[in-house]
Amino acid sequence: MSKYSPIIGLEIHVQLDTKTKLFCSCNNESFGAEPNTNICPLCSGQPGTLPVMNKQAVNFAIKAGLAMNCEINKHTKWDRKSYFYPDLPKGYQISQYDQPIDMGGYIEIFLENEKKELVSKKIRLERAHLEEDAGKSIHDKSIEYTFLDYNRCGTPLLEIVSKPDMFSAVEAELYAREIRRRMRYVEVSRCDMEKGHMRFDINVNLKVEKDDGEIAFTPIAEVKNLNSFKSLVKAIEYEIERQKNEFEETGIVKNDGNKTTRLWNDNRGATAQMRTKEEAADYRYFPDPDIMPVIISDEWIKEIQETLPEMPSVRFNRYLNLGLSKTVSYYVVDNISLANYLDDCLKLIGDKQELQKEFLNWFGRDLFSQMNQTTNSDDTNISIKITKEDFVGLIELIINKKITRNLAKEFLVDMWDNGKTLNELKASIPNESINIDEVINKVISSNQNMLEQWKNGNEKVFNVFVGLTMKETKGLVDPQEIQAKLKEILKK
Ligand code: ZN
Ligand code: MN
């Protein structure tokens, strides 16, 4: 049997969240707009128009590059990538060929080994460059015609190209998710998958080790325009199988060095041959004479560097070290609003160790399960329905033995579901201290028949007494304390 190892590289197009398009002043957001209502002579490719570079897009490309540990090119220019397609009215796309803004770089992903331990792996980047998006061809409105919507023309994209450093669909998904997190952390893109803010192209082939030790490679297949994590994973898995089967059937590797482009069909769950990829020369890249190169100074880079937040993988490690579980830590770093909430709470707690420990238990277990009931992890913004002051205050009440954990749980649900504030709930705690002995004696004396049963050896009665006492004390006394006291009293 031959041995197969997949080799996977990703190109990710991320739509930058600028106010206007890349080279004109049209609104950048045209999602849901009537076709061809968000265009101007420039982005619809009229002759005689001249592009003007959007500085915010360059800022965002630098910021994204720094977030991915790239080197920023000091001298960066714009090139025309020529090809004919009806949704590209100029007949060329303005992109960056040999001097992209971001060079090299890497990001970190976390994988589980056989012992279920997390190990980090670096995925290297080739580059990331700025370019404009094309329009959309609409084929499903009519049998006779294709309609064209140019609203998307000129939307700024950052194309992030990885090295072929991923060896499974799992690794590719982790990589893509970490890219999304970073783009969201540095606020250059909302990365809304449903709105097409993030699209994946995959490059997959197999290293084949034959029985006789010979090593061969299957031809690289490129699958374009995958727009969900699900189809990313499925398309990679499909390609691995397809290439493996093709090799098993023929026993030869038909590799002429050319990439083939395949199309993913979500309904069929399969890829189909589209065309043999044009070589780079086919695009006739040449510097765009209409736009000046951009010189990026050290000061410019430094200024942006200073605005970078802590990166998700660093944050993830920090949360693990605090004692939060892998699942919770992943969930939290995926949602920056939640991560910020957690950090704000930790700031309020300061160096109070006992409080921090109790707080993290409640955060990772109880608050987390409240959130899971009302939200899903792909939400961009999870709204936490309890203020950080109230949440930390609640945990302080437990630590100071003002309320039991059971009652705290009720308070938490009341705050989350009904929008109650901690102050409102505190008012319901009686002021006078409770005499447990008194309450237990009252419970026993008003249930004489149960006391008889207890004396006759029915041990189940014990828990009934505990329950009745808890009810009498309205959950304000810790159940363990009640059990201890009850044992003491029953012994007499
Ligand atoms: Zn325009
Ligand atoms: Mn591209």
Image (cartoon, helix red, strand yellow):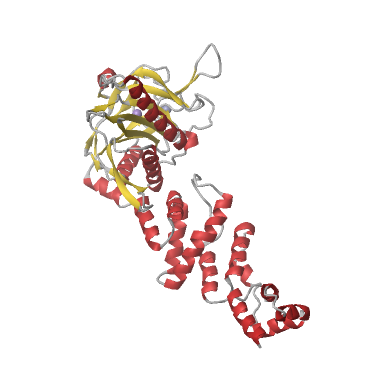
For ligand 1, the image quadrant comes to: top left
Question: Which part of the image, by quadrant, shows the N terminus?
Answer: top left
**Residue 330 placement, left or right of 71:** right
Q: Nearer the viewer, residue 463 or 160?
A: 463
Tell me how many marks there are: 0
Residue at left offset 69%, top offset 78%: 457
Answer above or below: position of 56 versus 145: below
**Residue 403 placement, left or right of 320:** right
Residue 75 shows in the view: yes
Q: Nearer the viewer, residue 295 or 490?
A: 490
Answer above or below: position of 336 versus 276: below
Residue that sits furthest to the top in the current view: 144
Residue 339 in the image: state x and y as whole percent: 44, 55
Residue 352 shows in the view: no
**Residue 185 placement, left or right of 127:** right
Question: Which part of the image, by quadrant, shows the C terminus?
Answer: bottom right
Answer above or below: position of 341 versus 357: above
Residue 345 in the image: state x and y as whole percent: 46, 63
Residue at left offset 40%, top offset 25%: 134
Q: Quadrant of residue 424?
A: bottom right
**Residue 15 placement, left or right of 9:** right
Q: Nearer the viewer, residue 126 or 156?
A: 126
Residue that sits furthest to the bottom in the current view: 492
Residue 127 in the image: state x and y as whole percent: 27, 36
Q: Quadrant of residue 238?
A: top left
Residue 254 in the image: state x and y as whole percent: 29, 19
